[in-house]
C-alpha cells in the first residue's frame, strides 16, 4: 500500500498551485514558473495514480502521457516559440530521480541559451563519467 501523504506528486492540489495546468483523466501537466529557474517553460507530466517509475505506467497512462505531451508542445509553441525540446524520464536515484513518482520532464529549449545544442548525452558521455572497473 502506498502512502499518498509521503509523495508530493500524489497531491495534485500542490501540482496545480501557482501553475499552468493541462490534464486528462489519468495524467496532469504542471508548469510552475516559480520552480523552472533557468529553464523557462519547463514542466512535468505526472500520472495521477502513484507509479514509482515510467516502467510502472499502464498502457492507458502511456497514451494519456503522450496526449498531454502533444498538448504541452502546442501550448509552449504558441506561448514561447522554442527552437527545440528535451523530454525525458529519470529512473531511480542513480538515474537522477528525486521524487519516486514517475514524471516526464518537458523542457523547451532556445537557440540563445548558453548550452543550446547540448542534450542529456552531453553531460553523461564525458570521460569523467566513465565507470571505473
Image: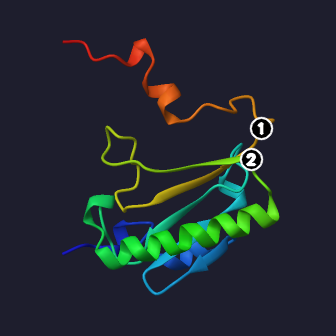
| Residue shown at 56% from the left, 35% from the top | 119
**CB under 8 Å between discs 1 and 2:** yes
Q: Quadrant of residue 130?
A: top left
Q: Which residue bears the numbered disc 2?
A: 83
SS of the residue under disc 2: loop
Reading the chain from its start, which is encountered first: label 1 or label 2? 2
- Count of numbered circles on the image: 2
Q: Is residue 89 above or below residue 29?
A: above
Residue 28 appears left or right of 32: left
CA gap, disc 1 and disc 2: 6 Å
Residue 58 is situated, as x and y percent measured from the top left of the image, at 28, 74
Q: Is residue 123 above or below residue 97?
A: above
| Residue shown at 31% from the left, 37% from the top | 94
Residue sitting nearer the eye, 1 or 87: 87
Q: In the rendering, which numbered label is found on residue 111?
A: 1
| Residue shown at 32% from the left, 43% from the top | 93
SS of the residue under disc 1: loop
Which quarter of the rendering shows the N terminus?
Answer: bottom left
Residue 8 appears left or right of 20: left
Q: Is residue 123 visible?
A: yes
Residue 55 is situated, as x and y percent measured from the top left of the image, at 27, 60
Amino acid at each position: 500500500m502506498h502512502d499518498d501523504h509521503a509523495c508530493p506528486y500524489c497531491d495534485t492540489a500542490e501540482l496545480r498551485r501557482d501553475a499552468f495546468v493541462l490534464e486528462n483523466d489519468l495524467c496532469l501537466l504542471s508548469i510552475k514558473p516559480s520552480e523552472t529557474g533557468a529553464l523557462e517553460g519547463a514542466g512535468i507530466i505526472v500520472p495521477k495514480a502513484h507509479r514509482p517509475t515510467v516502467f510502472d505506467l499502464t498502457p492507458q497512462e502511456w497514451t494519456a502521457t503522450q496526449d498531454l505531451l502533444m498538448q504541452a508542445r502546442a501550448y509552449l509553441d504558441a506561448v514561447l516559440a522554442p527552437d527545440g525540446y528535451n523530454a525525458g524520464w529519470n529512473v531511480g536515484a542513480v538515474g537522477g530521480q528525486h521524487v519516486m513518482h514517475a514524471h516526464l520532464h518537458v523542457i523547451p529549449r532556445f537557440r540563445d541559451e548558453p548550452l543550446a545544442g547540448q542534450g542529456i548525452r552531453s553531460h553523461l558521455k564525458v570521460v569523467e563519467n566513465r565507470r571505473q572497473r
